Image (tube, coloured by chain):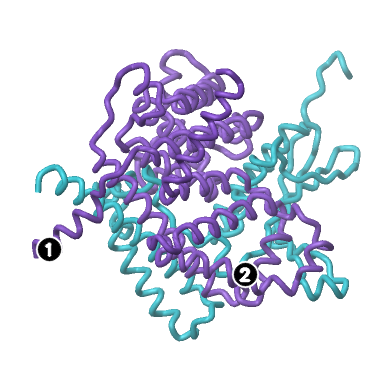
Chain colours: A cyan, B purple
Amino acid sequence: MGFKGVYLAGVIFHLLLVLTVSCRDTFVVLSKGHTIFPSNFDSSWREAENLTTAVIGQDLPKSNPLRQGLGAYLNAAGIEAGYGFFAPHVPGTYKLVFELHYHDGRIEYETPSVNTSSAGLHLVSLLDFIGQVEDGVVREGMIKFLVYAAWRKHHDVSMIRAVFGTVDFPTAREFERGGRESYQILYAYDVTFEPKPVPKHQR
Amino acid sequence: MQAAWKRVIDFFFPIQSDEWLTILRIGLAIQVLLYCLSMRSDWTYLLAGTGRGLISRDLSEATLSGESSFIPRLGWLVKIGSHFGLSEAVILDGAWLCLVCAACLLVVGLFSRTAAISTWFFHLCAVKSGGLLAYGMDNFTTIGLFYLMLSPLPDKCSVDYKFRNVGLKNPQLHGLFRRVLQVHLCIIYFFGGLAKCAGPGWWNGNSLWRALTNTPFNIISPEILVKWKDLFPVVGISVWLIEIGYPFLIWSKRTRNIWLICIIVMHVAIGLTMGMYLFALVMIVLNVAAFGPRWEFARVKETFRFLRFRTGF
């Protein structure tokens, strides 16, 4: 055996983890349906997903040392997620629009922004993440974080309405026939702000 | 039994030169440098804690703790810094600077191992603390840096080898680590292709159209794209065929170069048409390091020698 055996054991363990995580994420994708496979396979995919989730210790209690250790290793190696990018289909883009209401009745519109296109890709990931959150309270909380970031740039607003929706682009054929992108509102949240006290010397 | 064991050992421990490691080291270091430069103006805004950034870093780190409390994060550094009276902004800027310095050392191969570990650590901290903002490129960079950190550094082109007389490691270890990267890439492409192939949109071209027209990937105007709509089904099917075929056709000497060129062309196209330049770069670096043929490395070296001769250096 010698040093080769030790290395080999480590490598096989690592590659099995990569394989298991990849299988799990593929099963997640397939179990959601809308694939070329018959829909009566969906429950089988779900069972396979549960099995692979168990293999990587994700169904253990959060405080379990095995789950903690495996979780740390998977994240440290960058292998905690599968590779089904843009699959099985490309979803619409999520969009967040802030409606800024000022005390004087003015209304302005703004979207969350960053300085570079590279950071823009990260912002898109964030909106995708928010769009996929199923828990309404968590989603609202996350959007309010973004509202707060917008408010820091516009201290004089009385209310910000955050409108979260999807942008759907027509298919190539529809586009040819004159179809254009549409914005579908999914959620809207109003956040009101107290007017800032005006200093005495400015009254 | 012994024959099977020998075959396994022969597969995982081929004798390998260190050229692949040079490509991986320099490629990933450039990748991290470009990542840092492209994120500089948004770094603090994206990674600051509650009440100072776009979305709270604390929120990302709380989500991360749900997976494991041992995953490196910027919050650890901020906590340590606060004991010394350093503000969060200073720590975040310091982390950015450390990442840049570590990547610079990695480019030239000075203190290769320390530089590789530091680059992996600071990059992982940034990616995990901004976990809600992360996408595929971050994951692939982490994968590459993880392998680089464990790989038998230094390589012949590094300053460590040339000027600090640090010896090269066992060529079979080079073989092992390159093999792991190769197998990992095969898994990545196979499952990526499989998931795409399951969606009807990748058969009729709709998914490709959507990928190219969705914001912020809409670099090319849809008016131009729509003229090529009849090609979309062919290109869509080609994408998942190339990906699924990767683990089967990349190993044979006959098909390796063709498949490698196909996959690199695909990533260049993704970079150019969707604006995902860093994603394209990291995938090309990983592929060339894993499967780049020796003559490619030799040719690059020859070109450098020629340029040095012409420029008089």
Residue B291 picture location, percent across and down: 42, 51
Secondary-structure class at tag 1? helix
Q: Give the chain of mark 1.
A: B
Q: Which residue is mark 1?
A: B3
Residue A120 image offset from top left, x and y in percent: 67, 43
Badge nearest the viewer, 2 or 1 = 1
Q: SS at mark 2?
A: helix
Q: Amino acid at mark 1?
A: Ala
Same chain? Circles 2 and 1: yes
Q: Nearer the viewer, residue A72 or B170?
A: B170
Q: Residues within 10 Å of mark 1 (few under 14, many from 20)?
A: few
Front in this rendered view, residue B20 or B107: B20
Q: Earlier in the sequence, mark 2 or mark 1?
A: 1
Residue at 54% over, 68% down: B240
Residue matched to label 2: B236
Of all chains, the one bearing label 2 is: B
Q: Position of residue B287 (x, y in %)?
A: 47, 50
* Residue B184: image location, x then y, percent: 38, 54
- B99 left or right of B213 in image: left
The residue drawn where x is 35% and y is 25% is B114
